Image: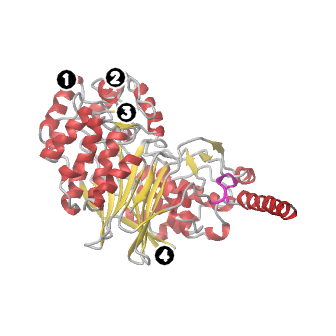
Amino acid sequence: MKSSAMRSSLFFVLLIMLSSIASAQPDRLTGKPFATRSEVIGEHGMVATSQPLAVQVGLDILKKGGNAIDAAIATNAALGVMEPTGNGIGGDLFAIIWSAEDQRLYGLNASGRSPLGLSYEQMKQELEKRDRESIPPYGFLPISVPGTVDGWFQMHDKLGSMPMNRILQPAIEYAEEGFPVSELIAFYWDIGARIHSDSPGGFKEEMTINGRGPAKGEIMKRPTLATTLSTLAKNGRDAFYEGEIADRIDQFMRENGGFLRKRDFEEHTSTWVEPVSVNYRGYDVYELPPNGQGIAALQMLQILEGYDLQSMGYGSEEALHYMMEAKKLAFEDRAKFYADPAFEDIPVSKLVSEEYATQRREQINENSANTVEPGMSVLEDGDTIYLTTADSVGNMVSLIQSNYRGMGSGIVVPGTGFVFQDRGELFSMDPDHANVYEAGKRPFHTIIPAFVMKDGEPFMSFGVMGGGMQPQGHVQILTNIIDFGMNAQEAGDAARWRHSGSTQPTDAADKVLQDGGTVNLESGYPWDLIRGLMLRGHDVEYSTGGYGGYQAIMYDSENGVYYGASESRKDGHAAGY
């Protein structure tokens, strides 16, 4: 009896000890590093993205002998079926690809251009009819040529291995047979259905269930998209840009007051570009050059190189202050200089140089800056998908794809099953601006993939989708890993901040930040930190969303394995084998 009582007493003490230990573990609510799950570890391959079924599509391609490029295309095609709230073949694509055979990085800009038949003067007249000064978010005016399909075939022609008809087959089957809609996607799908309920064309018929978005768990079929994807699988890239799909689009645009023509599709090309890099504390960080905003992350990193963030500590008032001020400086340059390099001479090398970062760093002090100007004499929102893949021979793909504004322009050509993007909204109408609207020009783009090399070997493929959050998110992920010692999953789950209010590439050329903007913080930051930021002059607010969507694959060269990480704020996951 006595022994039983002692055992009971010891068990009770043990429970108390375990409870105490558990309660002492780091939690995001304390502002300390926290992971919602373990990293996924696999030797032969890895896929990470925002929809679980699409992850399995990519993984199946790898297991059937496809490489990382094949898996990326298959995953993207599946996401276009299952997550049209963020992407689809009516949008654009950017990618950074590590080729193990070539031992080099390739950069692909698969973004489209404005209609050749819509001049600046005509655009201005169209805006005057609508009593607007800027390009609207929906309808025909913001539509540019979709670049995704050409991007897929460019990637495949250069580095793919499996036939395209096999790569696209899983997406075709899901579109034909249906798929259960996941939770967060269902939420955004319903919003898109309400926004575009009166759009001309086939949106209601082809993108909704009797005018509403599908509910969580409801089976959604997309037969017209299945037909379009089947045409691509059978007849290739030219079916979209020179054949029957282009013909159908041309006819619909002519009959409904649109501006794209078959000529725009026939003359479309993607561009292979050299990724731009800076070295941040021994890690070579790569982004793509404009018309995207990737080099804003590089500018921020160059500025932050001059501060000892590690000694300041993750989530510290001092570290956050310097990061936010670096963002303000980089984004004022972003607003003035980032544009289509075919139309403007962009000083990329100077913008990301150490010398320029040193000059910009001199403008930062212990208090928040209100007025910020570029140093060399709308975009906060954006629904996007990011995916990353890796295979058994070492190829890795960092790919981002989007319609912009969730379901894009709302325009669906009947019988095609996809929504056209509305990237043209991101042009400026100021004739003195580098990003001014012109016919046949690529608009400023928010979507950016990233890649990190260490000592000449691949280290990490990652992205943080979400409009103007993306460069800020890239920097937060990298500092979490490099400066604060987090693993790939912790780095994504840690509380984030988002600064908004910077001058935009759609503004007038002479506009500058005048009021310091606003900082939104996730709930993981404690009050004493928030109070400290306020005392430094930061305008702090709170928001339940807009902090991006992160996915990553990290390569461990010592053990020869991949570590996958996925965004806890999205539906998806990472999976490997």
Quadrant in which the N terminus is drawn? bottom right
Q: Residues within 10 Å of mark 3 (few under 14, many from 20)?
A: few
Q: Which of the marked residues, 3 or 4, is nearer the chain's N terminus?
A: 3
Tell me how far mark 3 sits from mark 4, CA to CA. Answer: 48 Å
Residue 415 visible to an observer of this rendering: yes
- Name the foreground residue: 172 vs 331: 172
Give the x, y percent position of residue 449.
Answer: 39, 57
Between discs 3 and 1, the one toward the N terminus: 3
Q: Position of residue 309 (x, y in %)?
A: 62, 67
Q: Which image quadrant for residue 245?
A: top left
- Please report contact status of discs 3 and 2: CB closer than 8 Å, yes or no: no
The question of residue 377 being in magenta is answered with no
Image quadrant in which you'd find residue 543: top right
267 sits left or right of 386 in the view: left
Disc 3 marks a residue whose amino acid type is Ile
Q: Nearer the viewer, mark 4 or mark 2?
A: 4
Is residue 434 placed above or below 475 in the rendered structure?
Answer: above
Q: Amino acid at mark 4?
A: Gly
Identify the residue position indicated by label 1 in the image.
255
Which residue does the numbered mark 3 point to in the structure image?
Answer: 219
Chain part drawn in magenta? 26-33
Measured Cα–Cα span from mark 4 to mark 2: 54 Å
Q: Which residue is mark 4?
A: 282
Query: At numbered mark 4, what does the secondary structure look like: helix, strand or loop?
Result: loop
Q: Earlier in the sequence, mark 1 or mark 4?
A: 1
Mark 3 or mark 2, which has the lower sequence index? 2
